[in-house]
Amino acid sequence: MDIRSNAILAMILGLAISSQVCASGNERGNGDMPPPPPSFSSIDSDGNSEISVEEFSAQDLPQGDPETIFSEIDSNDDGVISEEEFASHKPPRPQQRQ
């Protein structure tokens, strides 16, 4: 084989291997990446444009007490989370592994 054929073969082999590595990583799930947060509308089960503590507590939270987290997001303490409060809340960053 000539040099050009060897280079093309090497590129094809490299692409095949890298696509397999990416595919196997997606099948296992990436343990370093948390799942995306739920949308406001997915939590607001009754569609009234507010999230009650009951609606929020029905969520599967990765950590923490639902009522405590709800209180942190409900910045005006009116007992519901508005879409604005939901959008402006920044959850704490996970601690870096050492």
Image (tube, grey):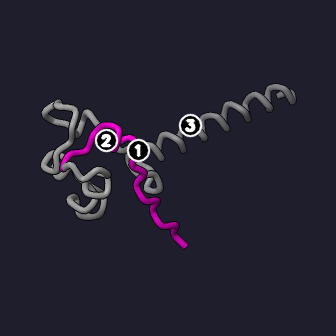
Q: Which residue is more in the foreground, 57 or 25?
A: 57
- CA–CA distance between discs 3 and 2? 29 Å
Disc 1 packing (10 Å; few <14; some 14–19; many ≥20):
few
Q: Earlier in the sequence, mark 1 or mark 2?
A: 2
Residue 16 lies, in percent from the top left, at 60, 35
Find residue 57 and name its label: none
Residue at image x 47%, y 45%? 24
Q: In what quadrant of the picture does the C terminus appear? A: bottom right
- Helix, strand or loop at mark 1: helix
Tell me the residue that label 3 is attached to: 19
Question: Where is residue 52 drawn, in percent x and y?
Answer: 16, 45
In front: mark 1 or mark 2? Answer: 1
| Left or right of residue 61, residue 5 in this image | right
Give 10 or 89, whichever is nearer the viewer: 89
Residue 92, how many percent across, how many down?
Answer: 43, 59
Q: Amino acid at mark 3?
A: Ser
Give the answer, above or below, for where 92 lies relative to 88.
below
> Callout 3: 10 Å neighbours few (<14), some, many (20+)?
few
Q: Which mark is first along the chain, 3 or 1?
A: 3
Quarter residue 80 falls in: top left
Label at residue 88 = 1
- Looking at the rendering, the stretch of residues picked out in magenta corresponds to 79-98
Q: Is residue 28 above or below residue 13?
A: below
Query: What residue appears at the point 73 percent right and 35 percent down from the top-left corner?
Result: 10
Q: Position of residue 4 (x, y in %)?
A: 84, 26
Q: Amino acid at mark 2?
A: Pro
Name the magenta segment's main secondary structure: loop
Q: CA distance from mark 1 to mark 3?
A: 38 Å
Residue at the disc numbered 2: 38
